[in-house]
Amino acid sequence: DGYLVSVQQADGTIIAYSNLQANPPVRSGDQVEQGAILGYLGGGGIVPADVLKIYVRTGKNEFIDPATILGF
């Protein structure tokens, strides 16, 4: 799946993005703004380079469908 970058929101929700290339432009502990570049696609060897995997875990430690957060 390549590299993974996760972002924790103020409400405790964690959104993780994977299949990213090495050396993402953010580091652990960085604060990011909406629209910031977190990484570049194409880091995995098995997953196609144009596929972004997204995982969402709520503050209640439950994984949920990312579409509910992203508005799909």
Image (spheres, rainbow, N blue to C red):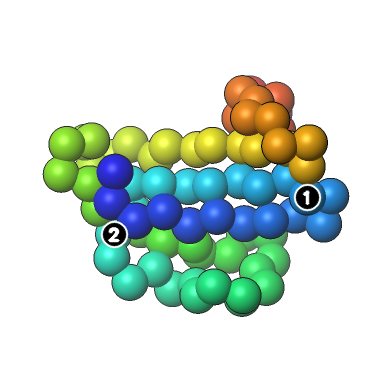
Residue at 50% in and 64% down: 37
Cα distance in 3D space between marks 1 and 2 = 26 Å
* Residue 45 in the figure: left or right of residue 66: left
Report the quarter where the C terminus lies.
top right
Q: Which mark is residue 32?
A: none
Residue at 41% in and 61% down: 39
Q: Are the residues at dot 1 and dot 2 in contact (C-beta closer than 8 Å)? A: no
Quick check: 59 above or below 38?
A: above
* Residue 38 in the figure: left or right of residue 2: right
Question: Residue at label 1?
Answer: 12
Residue at 29% in and 43% down: 1
Horizontal and vertical percent position of residue 14 = 66, 47
The amino acid type of the residue labelled 1 equals Gly
Q: Secondary structure at mark 1?
A: loop
Horizontal and vertical percent position of residue 34 = 68, 59
Mark nearer the N terminus (1 vs 2): 1
Work out whether residue 67 can be spotted: no
Residue at 48% in and 47% down: 17
10 Å crowding of disc 1: few (<14), some (14-19), many (20+) = few
Work out whether residue 26 can be spotted: yes
The amino acid type of the residue labelled 2 equals Gln
Horizontal and vertical percent position of residue 68 = 70, 25
Quick check: 26 above or below 9?
A: below
Foreground: disc 1 or disc 2: 1
Question: Residue at label 2?
Answer: 21
Horizontal and vertical percent position of residue 62 = 69, 30
Q: Secondary structure at mark 2?
A: loop
